[in-house]
Image (cartoon, helix red, strand yellow):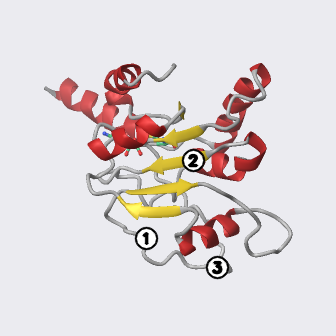
Amino acid sequence: MANQNLSSAKRAKNDEFYTQFIDIEREMQAYLDYDPKTFKGKVVYCNCDDPYESNFFRFFVLNFKKLGLKRLITTSYKPSTLANTQLALLGDDSTLPPFKGRPKVNANKFIINKVHDINGDGEFNLKDVAEELKANKVNKWAPLEEGGDFRSEECIELLQQADIVVTNPPFSLFREYVKQLIDHGKNL
Ligand SMILES: C[S@@+](CC[C@H](N)C(=O)[O-])C[C@H]1O[C@@H](n2cnc3c(N)ncnc32)[C@H](O)[C@@H]1O
């Protein structure tokens, strides 16, 4: 029994950690070394990623133009024990516009269609991402109705729009996660 408890604790722990930005950068660079057009014109979906905290979101939104992405979709998971604990999309920079309306207990989705230097300060960065999302027009954010489980209907609908799915999924659901990708014809 004790062993069983330990195993579930370990599984839960493995499910709840964030991938480092540098590791994502290295991994994506390996794909780009193989084919510089890997992401060109593609819809990328990160389906186990709180967009407020995920380095996958951060990497893809900051490299959106460079990679030539068509769209970036990111969804979070409501029961995540990580939410609001580790990273913050906009860090602790108090000069950044407050992200009013963040649904703390809900899962949410971000859909990025376009990025640009919206505030005209001469560079594109997360401040611009925040501004654009606040406007909720070209780029959109919204709470998810079904909690953000990658198996939920609304997440599967988003999955069907995606050319490439990139994330670090929950370890305990790895088989199910991979099976879903195969069932929906996504390359591994
Ligand atoms: C290993 S963590 C990685 C988080 C993020 N993908 C990253 O790499 O930084 C796995 C994430 O999947 C979330 N998660 C767990 N079960 C899920 C499910 N059924 N559907 C979607 N996400 C889930 C967890 O809350 C956790 O945030």
N-terminal of the two: label 1 or label 3? Answer: 3
- Gap in angstroms between the C-alphas marked 1 and 3: 16 Å
Badge 3 marks a residue whose secondary structure is loop
Of residues 15 and 97, the one nearer the viewer is: 97
Residue 92 shows up from this direction = no
Circle 1 residues within 10 Å: few <14, some 14–19, many ≥20: some
- Quadrant in which the N terminus appears: top left
Q: Residue at x 59, y 47 (%)?
A: 71
- In 3D space, how far apart are the residues under numbered discs 3 and 2 (Cα atoms)? 26 Å
Crowding near pointer 2: few (<14 within 10 Å), some, many (20+)? many
Determine whether label 2 and label 1 are within 8 Å by CB. no
Q: CA distance from mark 2 to mark 1?
A: 19 Å
- For residue 94, which numbered disc appears in the image? 3
Does residue 1 sit above or below 140 in this rendering?
Answer: above
Residue 118: x and y in percent read 73, 71
Query: Is the shortest distance between ligand 1 and the CB of mark 2 under 8 Å?
Result: no
Q: Which mark is residue 72?
A: 2
Horizontal and vertical percent for residue 179? 35, 20
Expressed as whole percent of the image width and height from the top left, the position of residue 187 reads 51, 20
Q: Quadrant of ligand 1?
A: top left
Instruction: Identify the residue position indicated by label 1 in the image.
Output: 102
